[in-house]
Amino acid sequence: MSLIETHCPKCKKKIFLDLEEVVSDSAVRPIRCSQCGNEFMFGFDSEAYPVSENSVPDTVAETKDQPQPKEQGSSDTVVPKTRLVKRLVMRRVPKARPKADKRILIIEDSALTRQQVVDLFSDDVQNIVALENAEEGLKELRQRKPDLLIVDLVLPQMSGAELITIALKYIPTKSIIIFTAAHTTNLDIFDEGMEGITLVFKGGADSFEELSEKGMRILGLE
């Protein structure tokens, strides 16, 4: 437990507070002084002092109490709450790994589904291009080969199956995921010797989870 010390602005009583509570919700819930009953907010400009782990006080304030400043002449340094919070967050929250230098091409005519698929990979992958039709998708694919192609089978004008046939001139089957709700049409593709393509059927949150897992595996980012 990490403690900080402040004081009641009314009676100057020392008050101790668990730093994790300060981070979580004490900024929006009042601190109550057990000596005079005064309630006050521990704002981000309040003075606070770190407390040594081997000098834990007899009582620690609830979320209704807060720490107080040291007596005049104390050698401890006043630390604003913002800095204490930053220290705790830096210590407790793992550093996010950098985004992978991979390229994903998504071809999906539904704007909602397209954005949902983008969101699945946006935290891990640098380059994501999402398009609504096969023609635009082919132009993009010819210019920059993707590490992962995610395509729906039912698309306006050119179908996903036609797009995949052309895409195989540029990328291997193992780099392609068909993400579709068309349960019958897709079987024709695999009859044409495209068994290396990954197939994921749309249908609820589980299908997006499956798409994410298989996509990350293809990208080598498991």
Image (tube, rainbow, N blue to C red):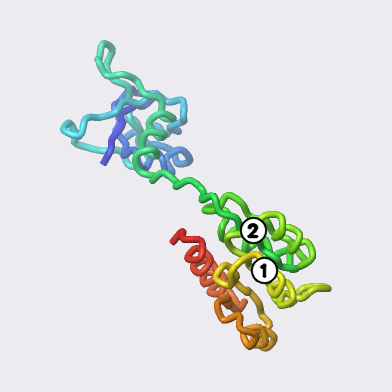
In the image, what residue occupies the spot 43% across and 32% down? 42
Count the labels in the image. Answer: 2
| Residue 114 image point, x, y percent | 68, 64
Precedes in sequence: disc 1 or disc 2: 2
Is disc 1 in contact with disc 2, using a CB cutoff of under 8 Å? no
Q: Is residue 3 left or right of residue 30?
A: left
In which image quadrant can residue 132 be found? bottom right
Image quadrant where one finds the C terminus: bottom left
For mark 1, does the 10 Å Cα neighbourhood hold few (<14), some (14 to 19), or many (20 or more) residues? few
Residue shown at 73% from the left, 61% from the top: 131
Q: For this view, does 165 lie left or right of residue 23?
A: right
Mark 1–mark 2 Cα distance, whole angstroms, equals 11 Å
- Could you say where residue 59 lies in the image, as x and y percent from the top left? 23, 37
Query: Which element carries disc 1, helix, strand or loop?
Result: loop
Mark 1 or 2: the one toward you: 1
Circle 2 — which element?
loop
Q: Residue 169 carries which label?
A: 1
Which residue has dot 2 on it? Answer: 145
The quadrant of the image that shows the N terminus is top left
Query: Quick check: 218 above or below 54?
Result: below
Q: Which of 55 and 194 is in front in this view?
A: 194
Query: Which residue shows up at 60% across the image and 79% down it?
Result: 201
Q: What residue type is labelled 2?
A: Lys
Position of 55 compared to 35: left or right?
left
- Closer-to-camera residue (28/202): 202
Of 109 and 102, which appears nearest the observer?
102
Q: Residue furthest top?
A: 73
Neighbourhood count class around disc 2 (C-alpha, 10 Å): few under 14, some 14–19, many 20 upward = some
Q: Locate residue 145: give its quadrant.
A: bottom right
Look at label 1 and name its amino acid: Lys
